[in-house]
Amino acid sequence: MTIDNNENKLLNLMKRVRDEQKRKADYIVPANHMQKRTIEDSDGKMKPQLIVEQRGGEPTLVMDFNDVSFNQYAVYNGIESRTARRLQDQAPSEFDALLNRLHSQDSNKRMLRTFDNGSSSTLRANLSDKFKTFDNYDFLEASIPALMDRTEEAPEIMQADYTEKRMYMRFKFNAQTGEGANVGDLMANGIGFSNSETGHGSIAVWQNFWTLACTNGMQTDNRSRSAHITSARESDVYGVLSQEAKDADNKAMALKLRDLVKSYSSRESFDEVLQKMRLAGADVAEGIEPVELANNAGRVLALTKQETSGLLNGLISTIGQAGYERDKPLTRATLINAVTACQHKAEKDDVDLWQRRGGQVLNMRASDWSRVKEKKEKAVA
């Protein structure tokens, strides 16, 4: 039984996670032991680095900032990340001196999460020393068996993404399908996972809903989030536990993931969402133009101008699909497909956002839908 697809998305993700696991190193360091400096690299570009001076027989550490750790370092020191970027570009020496002055008076401990690159190290996260780690390697060891444990059908992976902030996996159950808002509008059940090693969100498991014609994914209300689903990691004693106790903690994590997979992949929960989609298909927006519907939806969903423009493009793409009847009125189901279509052009870390927004439209209150479909009165000449 396999849960990979013909592009080996899951296998490639697992290889990357395994390779990075070998290069990881974490350090707990008082802030006043850190020094920031800026050097010129081989390409003539100015590169920020963090130095942790030799202490207690340990060697001096030299780490290159990546974008994530640089932003975290700036925010920790009370400097907005865009301002920090400008200072780094325009006045690097003065910016180094300012940050080092701030750190010299700070004895709080920080967790520095790094990658060993052989000849250099990369600082990938600058976090509180209280941060409870549950790395992607551990997460895969817990989640993949939970998926493989399904005796009726293993899911197929649809999306496997990895960024400096998060890891994502989204699966589809090919045998669990049904008609949505319209006849022939085939949909499939699915499940999604995400995890962050760098402080950008907790472990998350959710039900994913796929429109098969366009492979748009939507997240339903069935969602579980926890800083750490396991109980022992919530305590301050995790660092002194034996390997046996940690293994038991990981086993508890695997069992909880198994139960969540079972719940979110049940036919009953899938049918509930199908019924909601059919109801959304009955919510018609009579006589409104796509531009006005998108603008109204942008205000209700609190989108930016750029996001609203993307929503309009998604709406036009949706009503232009094969099988969509010409002059067919727009519905709330049409808007759901338009919102979730935006994920295809979104940054990897924003795909979840658009999928959740699709679920937001699915569960939209009647008063909000009235605002979305409201037409402006045309001025009389």
Image (cartoon, rainbow, N blue to C red):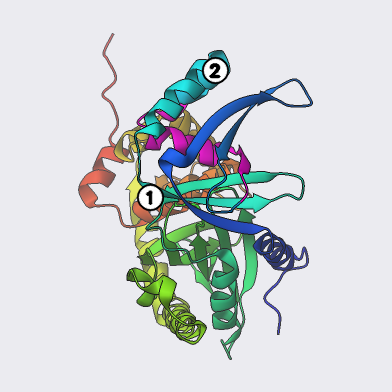
Whole-angstrom CA distance, mark 2 to mark 1, is: 54 Å
Residues under numbered marks 2 and 1 in contact, where contact means CB atoms less than 8 Å apart: no
Give residue 332's position: percent from left, percent from top: 38, 50
Q: Is residue 176 visible?
A: no
Give residue 128's position: percent from left, percent from top: 39, 51
> Mark 2 belongs to which amino acid?
Ser
Say if 49 sits above or below 135 in the image: above
Which residue is outermost to the left?
367
**Residue drawn 54% across the image and 35% down it:** 313
> Mark 1 belongs to which amino acid?
Arg
Write down the region rendered in magenta.
Answer: 59-82
**Mark 2 Cα-neighbour bin, 10 Å: few <14, some 14–19, many ≥20:** some
Which residue is outermost to the bottom?
151
**Mark 1 Cα-neighbour bin, 10 Å: few <14, some 14–19, many ≥20:** many
Q: Which residue is mark 1?
A: 332
Q: Considering the numbered disc 1 on the image, is that residue within a helix, a strand or a loop?
A: helix
Q: Quadrant of residue 235?
A: bottom left
Q: Considering the numbered disc 2 on the image, is that residue within a helix, a strand or a loop?
A: helix
Horizontal relation, residue 143 to residue 296: left or right: right
**Residue drawn 56% across the image and 50% down it:** 324
Please state, as top left, top right, bottom left or bottom right, where the C terminus lies in the image: top left
Q: Sequence order check: which comes first, mark 2 or mark 1?
A: 2
In front of the other: 354 or 16: 16
**Residue drawn 37% across the image and 63% down it:** 227
Residue 62, magenta (yes or no): yes
In front of the other: 263 or 214: 263
Q: Is residue 87 visible?
A: yes
Q: Which residue is mark 2?
A: 93
Say if 381 sits above or below 117 in the image: above
Please state, as top left, top right, bottom left or bottom right, where the N terminus lies in the image: bottom right
